């Protein structure tokens, strides 16, 4: 079994870029970060406003699509 903490990862489900920005988050993490509910999250996914990956039965939301939805530019400022 891989030791994700030794590799600098908090868990195997959160892939991160070199700047420690996650590449993906789970639906649960998305809801915690945005204070939106699961129903709203899946509605946004269904409307194509959030891009996802299906990995092992889990739905992971691309961080880049969250930034677009929230109107955050690449440098972190609001658009």
Image: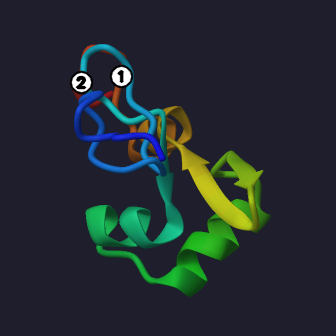
Task: Give the residue at x 55% y 78%.
Answer: 40
Judging depth in this view, the residue of 62 and 50 nearest the camera is 62
Asked if 70 appears above or below 29 in the picture, the reply is above
Q: Position of residue 31 (x, y in %)?
A: 39, 71
Asked if 51 appears above or below 40 in the picture, the reply is above
Q: CA distance from mark 1 to mark 2?
A: 5 Å
Task: Give the residue at x 34% y 40%.
Answer: 4
Q: Position of residue 6 (x, y in %)?
A: 23, 32
Asked if 76 appears above or below 3 in the picture, the reply is above
Asked if 58 appears above or below 60 in the picture, the reply is below
Q: Quadrant of residue 62?
A: top right
Question: Which residue is under mark 1?
Answer: 73
Q: Where does the C terminus fall, quadrant-wise?
A: top left
Task: Give the residue at x 52% y 82%.
Answer: 38
Asked if residue 27 lies left or right of residue 47, the reply is: left
Q: Secondary structure at mark 1?
A: loop
Q: Quadrant of residue 56?
A: bottom right
Question: Which residue is under mark 2?
Answer: 76
Judging depth in this view, the residue of 2 and 32 nearest the camera is 2
Q: Given contact means CB atoms under 8 Å apart, are the residues at marks 1 and 2 in contact? A: yes
């Amino acid at each position: 079994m891989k030791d994700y903490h030794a590799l600098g990862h908090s868990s195997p489900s959160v892939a991160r870029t070199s700047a420690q920005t996650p590449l993906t988050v789970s639906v649960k993490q998305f809801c915690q970060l945005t204070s939106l509910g699961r129903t709203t999250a899946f509605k946004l996914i269904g409307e194509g406003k959030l891009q996802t990956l299906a990995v092992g039965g889990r739905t992971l939301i691309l961080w880049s699509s969250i930034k677009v939805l929230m109107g955050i530019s690449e440098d972190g400022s609001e658009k």
